Image (cartoon, rainbow, N blue to C red):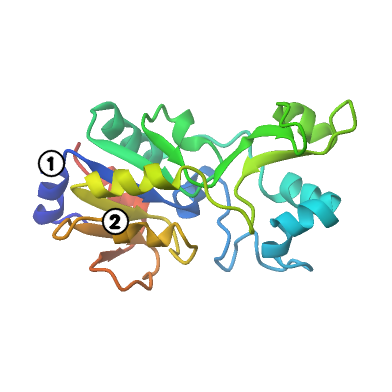
Amino acid sequence: MITKEIQKQFDEARQIVFLTGAGVSTASGIPDYRSKNGIYQGLEQRPEYLLSTEALHQEPAAMYNFMKEYMYFPEAKPNIIHKVMAELTKQGRARIITQNVDGLHEKSGAQQVLNYHGSLYNIYGVVTGQRSTVEAYMQSMYAKDGELLRPGITLYGEIPFRTEEAALWMQQADLVVIVGTSFVVYPFAGLLQYVQPGVPILAINLEKIDTLYPVKQLIGDAGSFFKELKI
């Protein structure tokens, strides 16, 4: 998958920005969302509803049960993709903007990670903001004082985290690499508008993404790509 030109782009880049999605974590045993085997398939209620501010207020138990059953994988470990990206961040040559809420980029030791959609492991009360723990949340969706708990992820109906910072990182990038995302969720997919003209953009996915931006698309397994990449 890696041509001399692509390897050269990585070798010379000093401000790589990785844009990552659920496909990065599938090799760690975490299913993605929209593929035929994804967690969005076969649900009685729309996932966009179950992960919305509307469900949080109207049917918090439905949201809680969905997240508890389908979204938490505490035993999952970083794979080769996470590890190579982490090493590039440690070299001071890369940053990661991720849609993922699983915390595997941090587990891999990556530095400069921007969790655009938050983290499943940041638990707090919906009214007071009082912090709690994942362990407590796995036992009950209510705190000891009866307050409803939630994870600090971006729900449908909410604005993603640190959008201005993400835009700045994109403006500073000299190589952008999209990995493991269908790239249909906005405003994440819209971050490409901040890339400077002439900066190369790569996408490494099992399927082609639909975008109007000048993206060089590599169709194949991202794990194989990152095993092959020399850093």
Residue named by callout 2 = 194
Crowd band around label 2 with a 10 angstrom C-alpha radius: few (<14), some (14–19), many (20+)? some
Residue 92's spot in the image, x, y percent? 24, 29
Instruction: Please state which of the two labelled residues, at mark 1 or mark 2, is closer to the viewer.
Output: 2
Element assignment for label 2: helix
Residue 183's spot in the image, x, y percent? 43, 63
In the picture shown, does residue 201 fall above or below 130?
below
> In which image quadrant can residue 220 be found?
bottom left
Camera sees residue 92 = yes
Residue toward you, 197 or 92: 197
Residue 104's spot in the image, x, y percent? 50, 36
Residue 11 is tagged as 1
Label tally = 2
Which quadrant is the N terminus positioned in?
A: bottom left
In the picture shown, does residue 211 fall above or below 47?
below
Element assignment for label 1: helix
- Mark pair 1, 2: CA separation: 23 Å
Say which amino acid is labelled 1.
Asp
> In which image quadrant can residue 190 be found?
bottom left
Residue toward you, 15 or 209: 15
Say which amino acid is labelled 2.
Tyr
